[in-house]
Amino acid sequence: MPTHEVLNQAPALQDYDPFEADLALAEALRREGAGWAEAEVARFSRATATREAIGWGFEANQNPPRLRTHDRWGNRIDEVEFHPAWHELMRLSISNAVHAGPWRDARPGAHVARAAKMALVSQTEAGHGCPISMTYSAVPALQQDPALLGEWSAKIVSLEYDPRMAPLGEKRGALIGMGMTEKQGGSDVRANTTRAEALGGGAYALTGHKWFCSAPMSDAFLVLAQAPRGLSCFLLPRWTPDGARNRFFLQRLKDKLGNRSNASSEVELDRAWARILGEEGRGVNTIRLDCVIGAAAITRQALAQAIHHCAHRRAFGRRLIEQPLMRSVLADLAIESEAATVLMMRLARAYDRRDEEAPVRRLGTAVAKYWVCKRAAPMIAEALECLGGNGYVEESALPRLYREAPLNSIWEGSGNVICLDVLRAIAREPGAREALIAELRLGQGANRGLDAALDAAEARLADPDESSARFLVESLALALQGSLLARHAPAAVSDAFCATRLGREHGYAFGSLPAGVDVQAILRRAWPAAGI
Ligand SMILES: Cc1cc2nc3c(=O)[nH]c(=O)nc-3n(C[C@H](O)[C@H](O)[C@H](O)COP(=O)(O)OP(=O)(O)OC[C@H]3O[C@@H](n4cnc5c(N)ncnc54)[C@H](O)[C@@H]3O)c2cc1C
């Protein structure tokens, strides 16, 4: 620079190992049954954080997808064109089985290992996680129909990313999207007006629209439509069995707040060919775990960016990470991130133990989805502020994380709808309440504040009420996080969590920690490279 030397700027956080840096994640991987995957996850972790991969995340968001309704000769093609960086991200995740690990090899711990990988790559770029997640989540629905599963599974579990628009037989790998939401109702899918007319042999013609259909370049979609015997789930491929393009017409792409690398479309279905999944009137069965993983991942990345910056930036004669007030903010963010991580990984194990842990999975996923997603937006706003003005500019990762933050809370059940789902599970799922209480009680006796919170959560569970359901679900989530941290985290983290989140020795903003919190231990654990 002719006028000055550039000083006191943090180096880019790249070419590092986010798994090695995340002790809570690494411990949880081992504890929850996927120690066997450690080397594989570590290898993948380093690949997600190279300068090149991080660059793909920026490029894919600066160059959002473009809709191509027609070819140059005026034929409808209904395709979406993505920047090469998007394809690189997809290739990275698919070649490492993030979309299908447990469906390729169902050994104990497979969902846990896959959760860790998903959490790592979502820190690099969250948007491409949408098709990766939908493909993973769609498999339980396909399992209802062994014939359809047989037709699709080899392409779904393939490690080859094949972005070509082509019939299944010509493809080396396939992705699955979902089309549930319509203009007149997303949460209330019973309001769906798309009609399904039986053609015989399990085939139907679907007519109607979908108001949000993400990843429209997927090879097939789980679609809800009204069949004569009620709302039913269908598999709608982009190509019909006779090799023609299905009557699936992309109207436009959404101009979204964040998640800009990913395409979300509006679609017209004009007698589109589809196959029913299960019986008419049975709705849909997918996995919601990835909303928790997605929110925990961006929370962790925001923390990493904040601590990294503060470990390098100096103000008023000391590094920011040495300033007492900033240390309180960073430690508080670290507590939040570790609480999200332990809960995400505990739930992933409940997906591995499919039969034994069905009740805790049912209620635990909804509780975690509500709270971990809710906390992401305020947490990331605070992390952004740790970088000062540098956090507010697009060249840093923070604006993208901030715009992504509300999304996991909206899709697959917005906050209130998830709370209503918790009430439904409590009322109708046999053993769900008892399983959750048993899980909570495993932390009993470790901390007085936690014991009181467990009693209070259990009492609230006995008499749930719709208008106060948010308070109930928040109490359950905090009690669950407290119980997990008391059992598995160092005392510095779990004591601080219990004091601030359960004992309420905390203000409304992050960083208002009470005296006596071992901030040094919390920061060292959260970011060993901080050099403190
Ligand atoms: C980027 C993006 C991508 C998406 N991709 C897909 C996709 O691929 N496929 C797909 O099917 N959908 C997709 N969606 C849609 C998403 O799932 C819906 O937006 C979501 O389920 C909410 O539905 P809605 O928008 O119709 O809102 P509504 O159902 O109208 O809800 C609005 C608000 O009312 C609240 N509410 C609803 N019912 C009640 C009640 N009984 N009591 C109290 N409060 C209530 C909700 O919590 C919410 O806060 C996507 C959305 C976004 C933002």
Image (cartoon, rainbow, N blue to C red):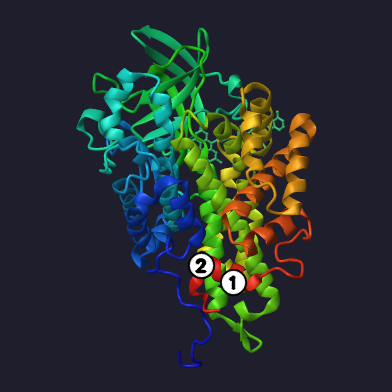
Q: Amino acid type of disc 1? A: Leu
Residue 254 lies, in percent from the top left, at 51, 42
Please identify the quadrant where the C terminus is shown.
bottom right
Q: Quadrant of ligand 1?
A: top right
Looking at the picture, tell me which residue is in the foreground, 320 or 227. Answer: 320
Q: Is residue 233 visible?
A: yes
The part of the image, by quadrant, that contains residue 365 is top right
Residue 504 lies, in percent from the top left, at 78, 56
| Horizontal arrangement in the rendering, residue 258 relative to residue 461 (left or right) | left
The part of the image, by quadrant, that contains residue 506 is bottom right
Q: Which residue is mark 2?
A: 396
- In the image, which disc is placed on residue 387? 1
- Residue drawn at point x = 28 percent, y = 36 percent: 165
Q: Residue furthest front?
A: 445
The kind of secondary structure element at disc 2 is loop
| Horizontal arrangement in the rendering, residue 61 relative to residue 469 (left or right) | left
- Residue drawn at point x = 70 percent, y = 62 percent: 510
Compare marks 2 and 1 and give the one earlier in the sequence. 1
